[in-house]
Each structure stands twice: as C-alpha cells, then as structure tokens.
Image (cartoon, rainbow, N blue to C red):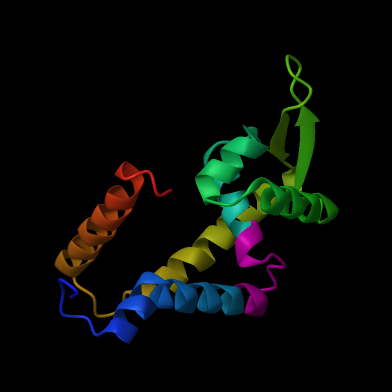
C-alpha cells in the first residue's frame, strides 16, 4: 500500500518528471523563438560550465546526471557549434577538460535570461512557501535514494 495520497498513475507521472518535462519543453520553445540554437541537454552542460569553466567530462557527467557516452556526444555537438573546446589535462591526457569559447560566453546572458523567464512562467501563482515545501520534498526523495545506494 502506498504511504501517500497519490493514485498510482499520478505518482508515476510525478516521479518521472511531468513538471520537469513541461518546463524543458517551454524552455526549448523560448530558446527557439529567441534564436538560441542549443538543445536543453546542451544548455545543461553550458550552464555548469558557466558556473565553473574547465570541468572534466567526468565532472560534467556527475553534475548533469548523464553517462559518459551522453556527455561525449553533447560535448562533440557543442564543439561543432563552436561553443566549447576540449583540452587534454597536462598531468593525465586521458582526462579532457571542457572550456567555453567566447561565443558561448556571449550567449550566457541571453540563455540565462530565457531560463529565468521560463522559470517565472512555470512558477506563476506559486508561493514562496509552496516552493520551499517542493524543494524539501524533492530533496528528501533524492536523499532517500542516494543514501540507499540507488543512484
């Protein structure tokens, strides 16, 4: 028996990220309308590099919760768009560090403004208290799975 008020179908929709998917779709639409030619997946990599440039591919895997082949593909495509460059680590050439190009740095403000606009659209009518409760619940769900070794 489930220990909450969700019906089984509602719970699975919640857990699988129905709201997250809707936000991603809206952000992609907002990017397209503004002429920002990156996918949501590419944006998530750029976002972490804007926070800390020069991360390794493994650090990007950890930050974005993606596997190595996915990050390799994303970085390959970002290189084709001339938004990042790979640089082999001097101490260990098996490790690639990923650096933003000037073009990516010029894209940052526009992309972040669109992301903030999208988040504001998504949170319209949601109180700060409700946001805090949602953050606490989702953090608890994550912590439950992380501590049980499921991640």
Q: For residue 54, which quarter of the picture?
A: top right
Q: Residue at x 43, y 48 (%)?
A: 151
Q: Residue furthest front?
A: 1
Relative to 104, is 9 above or below? Answer: below
Q: Is the N terminus in the top left, top right, bottom left or bottom right quadrant?
A: bottom left
Residue 23, percent from left and from top: 46, 74
Q: Foreground residue, 17 or 47?
A: 17
Q: Foreground residue, 130 or 9?
A: 9
- Looking at the image, residue 101 sits to the left or right of residue 57; the answer is right
Magenta span of residues? 31-42
Q: Residue at x 31, y 45 (%)?
A: 148
Q: Foreground residue, 105 or 150?
A: 150
Determine if residue 121 is in view: no
Q: Tell whether position 96 is magenta.
A: no
Residue 109, percent from left and from top: 57, 55
Q: Tell whether position 33 is magenta.
A: yes
Q: Residue at x 80, y 50 (%)?
A: 76
């Amino acid at each position: 028996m489930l220990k909450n008020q969700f019906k089984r179908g509602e719970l699975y929709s919640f857990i699988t990220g129905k709201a997250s998917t809707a936000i991603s779709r809206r952000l992609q639409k907002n990017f397209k309308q503004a002429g920002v030619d990156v996918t949501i997946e590419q944006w998530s990599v750029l976002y972490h590099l804007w926070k800390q440039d020069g991360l390794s591919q493994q650090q990007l895997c950890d930050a974005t919760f993606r596997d190595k082949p996915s990050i390799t593909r994303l970085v390959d495509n970002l290189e084709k768009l001339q938004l990042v460059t790979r640089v082999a680590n001097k101490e260990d050439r098996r490790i690639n560090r990923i650096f933003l190009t000037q073009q990516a740095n010029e894209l940052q403000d526009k992309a972040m403004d669109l992301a903030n606009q999208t988040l504001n659209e998504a949170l319209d009518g949601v109180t700060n208290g409700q946001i805090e409760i949602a953050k606490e619940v989702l953090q608890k769900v994550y912590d439950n799975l992380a501590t049980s070794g499921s991640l």
